[in-house]
Image (cartoon, helix red, strand yellow):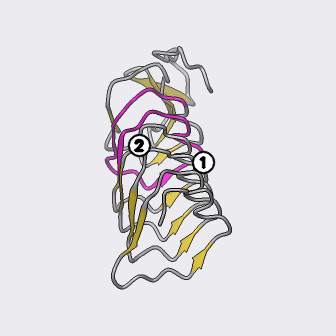
Amino acid sequence: FQATALRSISVQSGNMHLVSRGGVLFDYSGNTLLVFPAARDSDYTLPEDTICIGDYAFAFAKLKQIQFANIQEVGNYSFAYANLESLTIPDSIMVVGKGAFKRNAHLTQLTIGKGLSEIATGVFEGTETLKTVVIPANITQIGENAFGYSGLECVTFSEGSTLQIIGNAAFMKCHNMS
């Protein structure tokens, strides 16, 4: 969408495919958040009945915090180039698409829940302010360039790690790692 000045989205009544809730665009059922207005800089809590965040839904958004309720899936590039400062991926989330949190320039804190088994390709690429990450035991695969060009200094693998695959360049150009 990349409409970085967009503050609100409205949908005409009678539309059988889309609905606006508080200026945010959802599919008609409310199960999938499609577009969050990028210029809104307030924190956001997802509705309880929303289970999926669509591709690029929060791309370029100015928000600093997101509260996931019952989200199960985060689409490709959903939060790419957003301004998140901290991120907790709850246990309910089972899929995070490629590049989902790419280039969040202010991300300093990351907690990965127990629902994920894979950290997708490029998911945290270019998060230059992210210094540490704990890879939980449930992660079996880290995708290509997952943390490439990030500011990581320390990566910790949890006790009982089931990690089997680390993709090419998963930690490429992490110059601060020792």
Residue occupying image coordinates x 35% and y 63%: 113
In this rendering, the answer to whether 59 lies above or below 72 is: above
Q: Which residues are magenta?
A: 60-88
Three-letter amino acid code at disc 2? Answer: Leu
- Residue 121: x %, y % from top left: 62, 59
The earlier-in-sequence mark between 1 and 2 is 1
**Mark 2 nearby-residue class (10 Å; few <14, some 14–19, many ≥20):** many
Q: Say whether residue 75 is magenta.
A: yes
In this rendering, the answer to whether 16 lies above or below 3 is: below
Three-letter amino acid code at disc 1? Answer: Asn
Q: Residue 107 got which mark?
A: 2
Residue occupying image coordinates x 40% and y 38%: 84
In this rendering, the answer to whether 9 lies above or below 63 is: above
- Residue 124: x %, y % from top left: 52, 52
- Residue 69: x %, y % from top left: 31, 47
Q: Secondary structure at mark 2?
A: loop
Residue occupying image coordinates x 49% and y 18%: 9
Q: Is residue 20 left or right of residue 76?
A: left
Measured in 3D between alpha carbons, the distance from the residue under mark 1 to the one under mark 2, in whole angstroms, is 18 Å
Q: Nearer the viewer, mark 1 or mark 2?
A: 2
**Mark 1 nearby-residue class (10 Å; few <14, some 14–19, many ≥20):** many
Residue occupying image coordinates x 33% and y 82%: 159
Q: Nearer the viewer, residue 77 or 8?
A: 77
Q: Say whether residue 93 is magenta.
A: no
Q: Nearer the viewer, residue 37 or 121?
A: 121
Q: Nearer the viewer, residue 120 or 26?
A: 120
Q: Please, what is the dominant secondary structure of the magenta stretch?
A: loop
Disc 1 designates what residue? 76
